[in-house]
Image: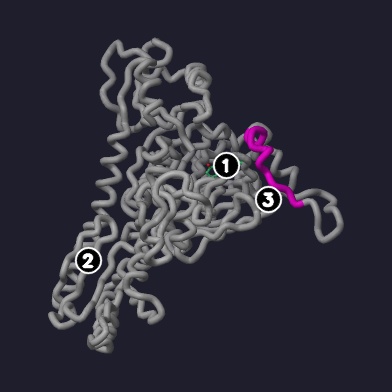
């Protein structure tokens, strides 16, 4: 059972030498039993606590602080773009929800409803927002009159509820999650197109520069796009352990479909009645799960410095007859110096845990850099730094502390990305035929294939790959297209290929 790994019997892999020494550590290894490893690492790393409603999780401060760091970045960036924050209600009346019938149809089973207050039935049940198109767009219609009311660019930070039935996974697929949802309206398609790409670049930035997770920017197929929109762009990540692609965030151009439905019209500069062009875009707490899956190891979480609320943990290592007070003072001074230069450092001065226990504890929580100060370091006016990502040990003279710690943190950030990219790239397989495709899929690859771009063919690929591992689908057609030689044929249909597309199993 998920999250109960510590108490269950040892099925795969050895069960914990570390555990005997310290009471800490993981029962499962990432490469042996990825699912149980993940369930255990999110709990032992203090990101998540399981809750008594399936698919709902408590986000502990260690996780929330990551969300807030990304939020601070993204919020400032969209404000530079003149996008403004707002907040619409959580509840949706049935009439409004079903106004856009086509778009809601496929999603209806996931909508959660409030039917009672106390003991009495509500006269009309009220839906809980799964997304806010139908909540917001009636007001877009009211607020937009003339071209001077455009663009209207709104964002909200909120929770949404989707009552999913397929296996819930912390961060990755939960019934309630946090996101930002951007909803914008423009006078022209060109402006909308530009924003779609600008927002997608911010999503790439969050994944690659903050979470150190490589992503591929591209366009979803007609089959995989948001059905209510015109086209969907995505940043796609990949989890090497499971061989599955995962949609990291999406930026949609909605075209004029919703404008038609909700009558979002304006008088253009020629005095004619025109319909707006709309976008919507979102990233969610799933980002955190992808980061954990990509970087975590057998000792626990591995947090990239940019998103770690504690970048450096300082641990005093006093021996019996050492100058304990001197060591504790040196630790405090180290933290103070680092904090003053903007580095997020803390000391673990608890006297009821041994240094060894503290090492394991902070490794489990993924702190990028540990600084130890023992009698010898104290005597030499230096500290010992230990990297979480590769266990490298570096002695740093106090005089160079800030400079070297900054260098190390930058290095860890870069190196996490490079290592993740190498692993991801090693999973990419270029194929040209169905046989090669099937073989690569069985090897859990992310597959780059020439495709005719026909929806029927994608459906056929799904049907032909159906099995207990789940069917393969298109992940995206990368914006960055390799050359497609004249006469290249589709891997699945044998018709002339129109583009290179990534395929694979996915979350
Ligand atoms: C579940 C229940 C009801 C996804 C749903 O991607 C409706 C929906 O509309 C639904 N699950 N969607 C699509 C969401 C599209 C769009 N919304 C704004 C985004 C970005 C943010």
* Cα gap from disc 3 to disc 1, whole angstroms: 21 Å
Left/right placement of residue 330 relative to residue 7 reads left
Which residue corresponds to mark 3?
A: 128
Nearer-the-camera pick, 100 or 302: 302
Left/right placement of residue 109 relative to residue 223 reads right
* 409 in magenta: no
**Dot 1 surroundings within 10 Å: few (below 14), some, or many (20 or more)?**
few
**Dot 3 surroundings within 10 Å: few (below 14), some, or many (20 or more)?**
many
Q: Which residues are magenta?
A: 103-114
Q: Is residue 152 depicted above or below 450 in this figure?
A: below
* Cα gap from disc 3 to disc 2, whole angstroms: 45 Å
Is there any visible trace of residue 287 in the rendered image? Answer: no
Closer to the eye: label 3 or 2: 2
**Dot 2 surroundings within 10 Å: few (below 14), some, or many (20 or more)?**
some
Which residue is found at the position 36% from the left and 68% from the top?
A: 310
Which residue corresponds to mark 1?
A: 167
Q: Earlier in the sequence, mark 3 or mark 1?
A: 3
Which residue is found at the position 37% from the left and 49% from the top?
A: 207
* Dot 3: element: strand
Left/right placement of residue 69 relative to residue 268 reads left
Which residue is found at the position 24% from the left and 59% from the top?
A: 391
Give the image quadrant in which the ligand numbered 1 is located. Answer: top right
Closer to the eye: label 3 or 1: 1
* Cα gap from disc 2 to disc 1, whole angstroms: 41 Å
């Amino acid at each position: 059972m998920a999250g109960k790994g510590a108490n269950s019997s040892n099925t795969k892999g050895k069960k914990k030498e570390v555990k005997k020494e310290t009471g800490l550590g993981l029962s499962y290894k990432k490469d042996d039993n990825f699912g149980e490893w993940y369930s255990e690492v999110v709990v032992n790393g203090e990101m998540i606590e399981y809750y008594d409603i399936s698919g709902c999780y408590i986000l502990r401060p260690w996780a929330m602080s990551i969300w807030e760091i990304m939020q601070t970045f993204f919020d400032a960036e969209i404000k530079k773009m003149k996008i403004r924050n707002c907040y619409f209600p959580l509840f949706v009346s049935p009439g409004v929800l079903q106004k856009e019938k086509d778009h809601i149809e496929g999603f209806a089973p996931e909508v959660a409803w409030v039917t009672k207050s106390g003991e009495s039935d509500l006269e009309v049940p009220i839906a809980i927002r799964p997304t806010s198109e139908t909540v917001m767009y009636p007001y877009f219609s009211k607020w937009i009159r003339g071209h001077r009311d455009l663009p209207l660019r709104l964002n909200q930070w909120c929770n949404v509820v989707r009552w999913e039935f397929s296996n819930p996974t912390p961060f990755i697929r939960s019934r309630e999650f946090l996101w930002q949802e951007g909803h914008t309206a423009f006078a022209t398609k060109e402006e909308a197109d530009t924003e779609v790409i600008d927002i997608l670049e911010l999503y790439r930035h969050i994944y690659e520069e903050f979470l150190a997770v490589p992503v591929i920017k591209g366009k979803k197929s007609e089959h995989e796009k948001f059905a209510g929109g015109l086209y969907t762009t995505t940043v796609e990540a990949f989890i090497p352990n499971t061989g599955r692609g995962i949609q990291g965030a999406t930026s949609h151009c909605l075209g004029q479909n919703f404008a038609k439905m909700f009558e979002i019209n304006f008088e253009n500069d020629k005095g004619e009645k025109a319909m707006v062009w709309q976008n919507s875009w979102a990233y969610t707490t799933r980002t955190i799960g992808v980061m954990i899956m990509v970087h975590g190891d057998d000792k626990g979480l591995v947090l990239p410095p940019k998103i770690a609320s504690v970048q450096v943990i300082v641990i005093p290592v006093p021996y019996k007859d050492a100058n304990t007070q001197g060591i504790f003072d040196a630790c405090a001074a180290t933290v103070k110096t680092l904090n003053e230069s903007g580095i997020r450092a803390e000391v673990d001065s608890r006297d009821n845990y041994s240094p060894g226990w503290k090492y394991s504890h902070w490794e489990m929580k993924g702190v990028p850099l540990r600084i130890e100060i023992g009698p010898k370091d104290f005597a030499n006016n230096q500290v010992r730094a230990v990297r979480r990502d590769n266990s490298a040990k570096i002695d740093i003279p106090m005089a160079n502390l800030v400079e070297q710690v900054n260098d190390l943190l930058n290095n860890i950030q870069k190196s996490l990305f490079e290592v993740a990219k190498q692993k991801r790239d090693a999973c990419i397989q270029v194929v040209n035929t169905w046989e090669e495709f099937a073989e690569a899929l069985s090897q859990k690859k992310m597959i780059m294939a020439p495709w005719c771009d026909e929806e029927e063919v994608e459906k056929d690929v799904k049907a032909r790959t159906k099995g207990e591992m789940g069917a393969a689908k298109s992940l995206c057609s990368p914006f960055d297209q390799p050359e497609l030689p004249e006469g290249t044929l589709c891997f699945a249909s044998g018709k002339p290929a129109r583009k290179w597309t990534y395929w694979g199993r996915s979350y």
